[in-house]
Image (tube, rainbow, N blue to C red):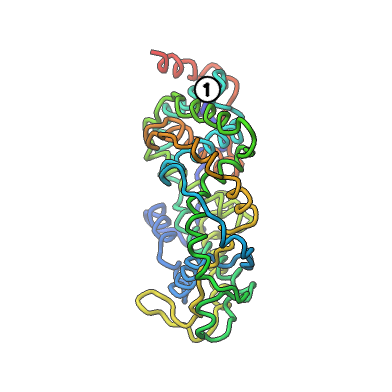
Amino acid sequence: MGCFCRQAPLLWPVVPALPAASLSPGASVSLDLSLQEPGLGVPGAPMLAAVSAWLSARWLPGPAFAPDPALLDVDWPAPPMPPQAMSTLLSLVLARASLVRVLGLDPVRPADLARLARVIATLNLRADLLAALLAAEPRWDALVTPLAQADLVARAAAAGILALPAPNVRLAATLATGVPVAPWRPVLAKVKLLVPLVAIGQALSVDWTAPGAVDTLAALLRQLRALLLPPLTNLPMVLQLLARFDAAARLQLALGVNPRLVGPARVRAMVAARMTAAIRLMPPGLTLQAGVVAGLPPMQPNPSLILDPVVIRLALALRPPVLDRLRWQVPPFESLPLLTTGLPLASLLEALSKLGLDPIRHAPCGPVCDAAAAVQALAS
């Protein structure tokens, strides 16, 4: 049994209304627009966005970059497949892991695959309910970006990055640790191409040097690529719901309150306050030139997030004898049901679960349960 229940008690209630003083004719529409207002009306919001973009482009803040000089002499191998193919393989592995984590269903088990198909079939019956939910749910995703910008700037300020000395030639070629970045660019480029395989190994706890590791992985990936699932009949609507509920979950994690319970007005005020606090941490004298911040040191990107000791250790295990056996033909992402159906479903359910919502039932809800009819339609 498994059903996306139409009677899930926590899923359908609308978000609390705004205080009466802030309501106006067409309040639900004006509310949606208020959440999308650029910068939420916070003075200094454009500069906050520009400083955040400056930090993101340099992978800051991050751990201090202190690499092992011996890595410069490593003959890094070329990846065995195009980046898109390796990304698809990683997505297959992560999609399976998400379904196991969220639903407790492993799609490589026939019984679990049948239950998963039932969940999808019953979700497809909820088009009217999902449409009503989408119409009532505020655009929480419009608040995630400014909050993330504020938090990034606050972390950078706490790390001392925004209080660096005035720009100079030496700083332009090094990081705060004094390590020159230029010699590491070729290493960074080569390791980045191996990162998807490193991530697959981490996700599956694969020891690439162990006998049979490649054969075990190949057998699993053959199973995952061959899985058949019914399509989501309204994928765009599922993706829109995913965007809103995932944003709400992110806001809850960052702000410590459930946005759907406290309402948009309070959440907007909390995000605006976080933005204002971050703006006050920025150094004076910054200017915007065509949307780009001027007045910060011309620091180079920090490679430490990629040239991490763990990543390096796992990448070094990917030697030619292993890579030569990974030269597989990988179908395109859009041709794999586990990715086009299973992954969006798992992502939506995970976002809902973070908000305390669980629309999945594992037993009939009573005489009005329509799961059996959905399964019959699926089989016909």
Relative to 365, does residue 291 appear above or below in the rendering? Answer: below
- Quadrant assignment, res 27: bottom left
Q: Quadrant of the C terminus?
A: top left
Indicate the position of residue 45 as horizontal and vertical percent values: 46, 72
Instruction: Tell me if residue 134 can be seen.
Output: no
Residue at 53% x, 63% y is 147
| Mark 1, secondary structure of its residue | helix
- Quadrant assignment, res 306: bottom right
The residue wearing badge 1 is 113
Relative to 21, does residue 178 appear above or below in the rendering? Answer: below
Q: In the displayed structure, does residue 130 sit left or right of residue 363?
A: left
Count of marks placed on residues: 1
Instruction: Tell me if residue 252 can be seen.
Output: yes
Indicate the position of residue 53 as horizontal and vertical percent values: 46, 68
Indicate the position of residue 297 as horizontal and vertical percent values: 51, 80
**Three-letter amino acid code at disc 1?**
Leu
Q: Quadrant of the N terminus?
A: top right
Which residue occupies the foreground of this view, 157 or 373?
Answer: 157
Residue at 52% x, 60% y is 187
Relative to 332, does residue 153 appear above or below in the rendering? Answer: below
Relative to 273, does residue 367 appear above or below in the rendering? Answer: above
Indicate the position of residue 192 as horizontal and vertical percent values: 50, 54
Callout 1: few (<14), some (14-19), or many (20+) C-alpha neighbours within 10 Å? Answer: some
Which residue occupies the foreground of this view, 245 or 167?
Answer: 167
